[in-house]
Image (cartoon, rainbow, N blue to C red):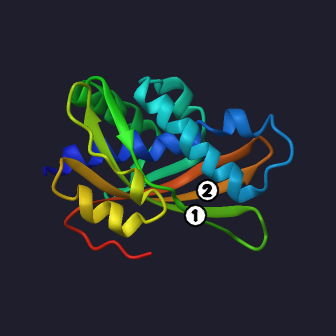
Amino acid sequence: MHHADRLAATVVLLLTPMLSNVGCTRCEGPDDEQQVRALIADAVAAAEAHDLGGLMGLTTGDFVVKPGSVGRQEVKGVLLMAFRRYGRFGVRHPAPVVSVAEDRLTASADLPFLIVREGAEAPDLGDLMDDPEGWMERVADMGDAYYLELGLEKTGDGWRAARARIRGTHDRWSL
């Protein structure tokens, strides 16, 4: 896979986890880990809807995507390119591995995911939702599968994505 394709896929999914802030900052009660998990679920829906403004509005001012150290402003163009490349798509993923720092101000989430174009057959992965490694082994040869490492910061507005790193299926996944 070309670097530009990996970067486009990275941005699509790296930004998706940010949108769930909209729902979580208004809710009361969920702990930080639940808020991060909800953020990922809600953000996937935003990416699938090609909501560029919503996604970009939920990054920190110094948001960066690796590899390549792509800054917040450059991400907009990459997102548009990804939306054109994939057209209508779905994002499939197991439960993310979430870790909230003791200070409750930073968190990380690790997530394998698969981008499935509209009309393409999506694999049945329901039995592996709580097994990210097994999930990734099953989808590794099915299409555009990636690993996402997301760094989050808690701000006055809720959780925001500060940094993201994407790796392709050829890279080793370790939890």
Tell me which residue sits at (15%, 56%) in the image: 141
As drawn, the residue found furthest toward the right would be 28
Q: Judge from the rendering whether residue 8 lies leftward or rightward of residue 154; answer left or right.
A: left
As drawn, the label of residue 152 is 2
Quarter-of-image position of residue 66: bottom left
Rendering coords of residue 115 (x, y %) = 30, 41
Residue at the far front in the pictured view: 127
Q: CA distance from mark 2 to mark 1?
A: 6 Å
Residue 28 image point, x, y percent: 86, 42
Residue 5: which quarter of the image?
Answer: top left
| Callout 2 crowding tier (Cα within 10 Å): few <14, some 14–19, many ≥20 | many
Q: Nearer the viewer, residue 56 or 131?
A: 131
Q: Quadrant of the C terminus?
A: bottom left
| Along the viewing direction, whichever of 117 and 161 lies nearer the viewer | 117
The residue at 41%/24% (across/down) is 50
The answer to whether one can see residue 147 in this image is yes
Residue type, numbered disc 2: Leu
**Could you tell me residue 13's position as x and y percent?**
41, 44
- Whichever of callouts 2 and 1 sits on the residue coming sooner in the sequence is 1
Residue 136 drawn at (x, y percent): 31, 62
- Amino acid at circle 1: Ser
As helix, strand or loop, the secondary structure at mark 1 comes to: strand
Image: 39 above or below 101: above
For label 2, the SS is strand
Viewer-nearest residue: 96 or 76:
96
Examine the rendered structure and indicate whether residue 35 appears above or below residue 151: above
Horizontal side of 134 relative to 56 (left or right) equals left
User: Looking at the image, which residue is at 26% across and 24% down?
Assistant: 87
User: In screen coordinates, is 97 left or right of 173?
Assistant: right
Q: Are marks 2 and 1 in contact (CB under 8 Å)?
A: yes
Q: Is residue 60 visible?
A: no
Q: Which residue is mark 1?
A: 108
